[in-house]
Image: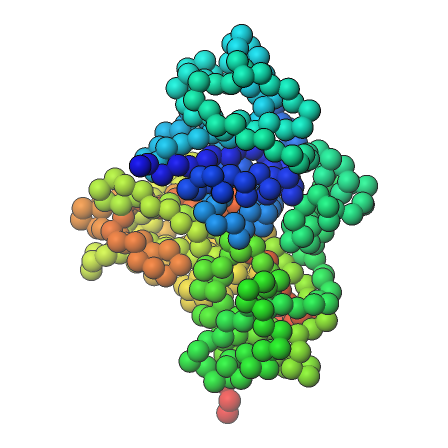
Amino acid sequence: MKRTIAVFGGSFNPPGIHHRQIVEQLAGQFDSVVVVPCGPRPDKATNDHIPPTYRAAMADVSFTGIRGVEVDLFDLEQEVFTRTHDLQRRYEPRGEVWHVVGGDLICGGSKCESVIHRRWENGREMWEKLNFVVLSRPGVELTKDDLPPRHRFIQINYDGSSDAIRERIYHGEPLQDLVPQQLAGYIDRHGLYRGSIPARATRVKLDNPRLLIIPDQRNPKALEWAKKLERYSCPEDPNMIVAIGGDGTMLPVIHNNWRKRLPFFGINSGHLGFLLNDAKYLTDDKLPPEIIFRQMPMLYVEMQRSDGSWVNGLTFSDAWVERATGQTAWLEVKVDGRVRLPKLICDGALVSTAAGSTAYAHSMGATPLLADTPAWLLVGSNVMNPVRWKSALLSFDSQVEITALNPSKRPITGLMYGVPQGEIISMRVRVSRIATVELGFSPMHDMAEKIAQIQFPPPPAE
């Protein structure tokens, strides 16, 4: 028998307890459930009031921990609205697809006057051919004749609305009975739905730390710190992830855990530790009572392989292309569709977030950026032409495309977060619309001073 897949699309702006209850009920009746937060919709302008990075995070936070449930963030990342018939094509290779709809969309179906018939693209055809899970909410009256030919009927005895949640937040009223507990904390931490632009940095009191502690297992100092913090360990229900080691420890911890949507806090037991906190500021072997969390972006990377196929991924630090043979690479570089470097002759080119700018980008000659700088970098490696060109500073809205000019003679390889992707012919990069990382720092941590140490190295000892 085919696996059954329930596809539950919606704005989820924000998700409420009633959304989670519906998903839990669906998970008990289907092999898997896919939650799809929709992209921009002309009929729901409120979707644009909150940046997609926050909507993506809220969806992950709200539906975590339910067996057989995944959250598909494609629409938010690509800034599109995927219609139901396209969702059908996307998921039908995985099994028998059932589309979850509210009973209000079904009313009038017996007369071909339902919302699906009248407003949905290809609505009449879908009504006859697709499978629908019809949710009957309190107050919605349905007749048997209104139901689609292929349907499952689920009666739900709870109700709620995102409008009511937003209204309560705006007036500063408590949320505990309307949204999952972890989501309430996320909304409060970022100041969402309060009629102002969400802050990129917030100061939070750490009253009850519950930690997922991930030390560098090869570093004795890191293991020592992990033992000191053991009393706060709560891997089954953490509210923060602590990485102990160096930047090389923090980066894979972020890549492996960012969709948990928990803040990260690093303790430096290595060298400079740009992304981590100096242990000397953690008195009495404790975490600081207050932590400043900075919202930092990830990059969305697409690479086209030599066979024409595409691979994509996310990186918190950097991605790059480099020559695959003894021949120098000849690259065309576009920024926002405009050719900026028609022939970049070099060993390779790298894009980097501010968080990754102290690593390879700096070693290639770029000036490192403060970790919360709203910009990212494009850097050349051993550039021969244009003469004296090293790097460029890019805005968050920019998109970069790097293409090999003669891939058969001068092939290039691609790397994302240090992982080789094989031979490629082009790379496209922009700031992700769904992936951000909350990185925590002690108020005593001076990021500017660490950058200054890189830019102004001390004189050699006599």
- Colour convention: rainbow
Q: Is residue 341 visible?
A: no
Q: Give how far across and how far down residue 155 sits, in percent.
A: 58, 31
Given residues 23 and 192, the one toward you in this image is 23
Q: Is residue 332 left or right of residue 283?
A: left
Q: Is residue 178 visible?
A: yes
Q: Give how far across and how far down residue 30 sits, in percent.
A: 44, 39
Q: Is residue 36 left or right of residue 141?
A: left
Q: Is residue 312 left or right of residue 306?
A: right
**Name of the residue lying farthest toward the left:** 409
Q: Give how far across and how far down residue 78 sits, in percent.
A: 47, 37
Q: Residue at x 65, y 43 (%)?
A: 17
**Name of the residue lying farthest toward the front:** 144
In the displayed structure, 305 sits above or below 422; it is above
Q: Give how far across and how far down residue 223 sits, in percent.
A: 50, 81
Q: Residue at x 51, y 89 (%)?
A: 461
In the displayed structure, 411 sits above or below 369; it is above
Given residues 222 and 153, the one toward you in this image is 153
Q: Residue at x 43, y 25 (%)?
A: 131
Given residues 188 and 196, the one toward you in this image is 188
Residue 296, by quadrant, is: bottom right
Q: Is residue 372 left or right of residue 66?
A: right
**Name of the residue lying farthest toward the top:** 111
In the displayed structure, 251 sits above or below 407; it is below
Q: Residue at x 44, y 55 (%)?
A: 315
Residue 458, by quadrant, is: bottom right
Tell me how many marks there are: 0
Of the 4 image quadrants, the one containing the N terminus is top left
Given residues 425 and 386, the one toward you in this image is 425
